[in-house]
Image: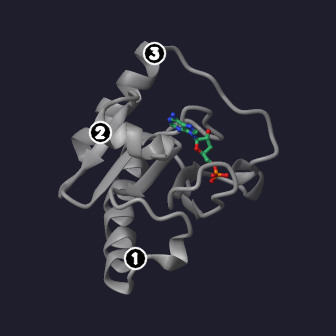
Amino acid sequence: MASIFSKIITGDIPCHKVAEDDQFLAFLDINPVAKGHTLVIPKLEVDYIFDLEDNLLMEMMLFSKNVGLAIEKTIPCNRIGISVIGLEVPHAHIHLMPINKLHDMSFEKDRLAFSQEEYKDIAKSIASYVSL
Ligand code: AMP
């Protein structure tokens, strides 16, 4: 069965898209740890990130860098934190989060919630700084 992220890629499930090329998609996390929390996924459905072929993994990191720098331009922060967990969704993904201190990256704190309009504006703003 297709992962929830594969369904996002095919458009069967909506997302707030931030960036896309032929191999990767970036979109806002639905339960963000921080404003601008973005997920980068490969279009190839592979569960564990270390099972990705080396070149694809490297390109995914470069794509994430591009998106991360765009988040940085949109959300004031010290830097972009990068995290890989993958315990909830079995489709490899990189979390990109604007952070100012260690706790900002904690997945144990209460998640934030924004209106659809706010998610749309955040995604649009980040997307405007992505240069692929
Ligand atoms: P993990 O697999 O533990 O790295 O966490 C998966 C992440 O995906 C969580 O932060 C969820 O909030 C996020 N997530 C799950 N479903 C969606 C969705 N439909 N759209 C955007 N983000 C999602």
- Name the quarter where the C terminus is drawn: bottom left
Q: Between marks 2 and 3, how big is the CA–CA gap?
A: 21 Å
Q: Quadrant of ligand 1?
A: top right
Q: Earlier in the sequence, mark 2 or mark 1?
A: 2
Judge whether residue 111 can be spotted in this image: yes
Q: Amino acid at mark 2?
A: Thr
Give me the residue at 38% from left, 31% from top. Answer: 16
User: Seen in the image, is 41 located left or right of residue 31?
Assistant: left
Mark 2: few/some/many CA within 10 Å (<14, 14-19, 20+): few
- Residue at 37% over, 65% down: 65
Residue, disc 3? 116
Which label lies toward us, 3 or 1? 1
Per the image, the residue denoted by label 2 is 10
Corner quadrant of residue 58: bottom left
**Amino acid residing under circle 3:** Gln
Q: Earlier in the sequence, mark 2 or mark 3?
A: 2
The number of discs equals 3
**Image height check: is 40 above or below 2?**
below
- As drawn, the label of residue 31 is none
**Callout 1: helix, strand or loop?**
helix
Residue 10 spot, x, y in % from top left: 29, 39
Query: Residue at position x 27%, y 40% from top?
Result: 127
Measuring from the top left, give residue 95's x and y in whole percent. Answer: 54, 55
Mark earlier in primary sequence (3, 1): 1
- Residue 70: x percent and y percent? 34, 50
In 3D space, how far apart are the residues under numbered discs 2 and 1 (Cα atoms)? 21 Å
> Mark 3 and mark 1: span between their CA atoms?
31 Å
Out of 39 and 66, give the one closest to the viewer: 39
CB atoms of marks 3 and 1 within 8 Å: no
**Residue for badge 1:** 57
